[in-house]
Image (spheres, helix red, strand yellow):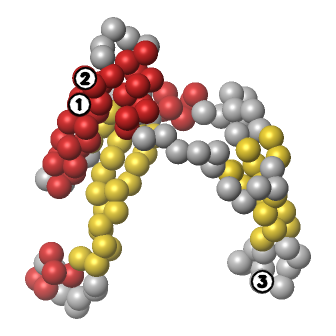
Amino acid sequence: MKLKPVQKFNPQDAGGDRKFYAQAVATGKIDLKRLAYLVSNQSSVREGDCYAVILSMVHNIMDELKQGKIVKLDRLGSFQLSVSSEGVPTKDQVNGNLVKDIRINFRPDEDMKGTLNTKTVKFTISDSLI
């Protein structure tokens, strides 16, 4: 994983010295088609079948989230919707029209968190902005 040095100030100490911090640099993107290709090469299932299953899973995750469910994928993590809304004086006034934004929150599973740590990821320094 590439890192780049980024100079920042502490918002709690605006007058303090700026310090350099490590920031992760993305080295590319991977999409569902590529994941399906990789999975198909690691199993006896064809690429198109893998892609169809992954797309179906995404569709079903979205449907379950819309119903207010937490979607837990073992070894990967959990997805859950959260909202931000306008405030009103009484609880009787709360309704769906107050919702301003919906977000999808992801919490990685313990297996995933345990696999990705400073002992298993190798770092290099880059001045690239990519």
Q: Quadrant of residue 77?
A: top left
Q: Amino acid at mark 2?
A: Asp
Give the x, y percent position of residue 73: 32, 33
Q: Could you classify mark 2 by the number of other residues whose Cα lies within 10 Å: few (under 14), some (14-19), or many (20 or more)?
A: few
N-terminal of the pair, mark 3 or mark 2, is 3
Can you identify the residue that label 2 sits on? Answer: 49
Residue drawn at the location 82% of the way across and 56% of the way down = 127
Residue drawn at the location 72% of the way across and 60% of the way down = 129
Can you identify the residue that label 3 sits on? Answer: 14
- Marks 1 and 3, how far apart at CA: 51 Å
* Depth order, front residue of 38/115: 38
- Marks 3 and 2, how far apart at CA: 54 Å
* Depth order, front residue of 106/51: 51
Q: Secondary structure at mark 3?
A: loop
N-terminal of the pair, mark 1 or mark 3, is 3
Q: Amino acid at mark 1?
A: Ala
Cβ atoms under marks 1 and 3 closer than 8 Å: no
Q: Is residue 79 above or below residue 56?
A: below
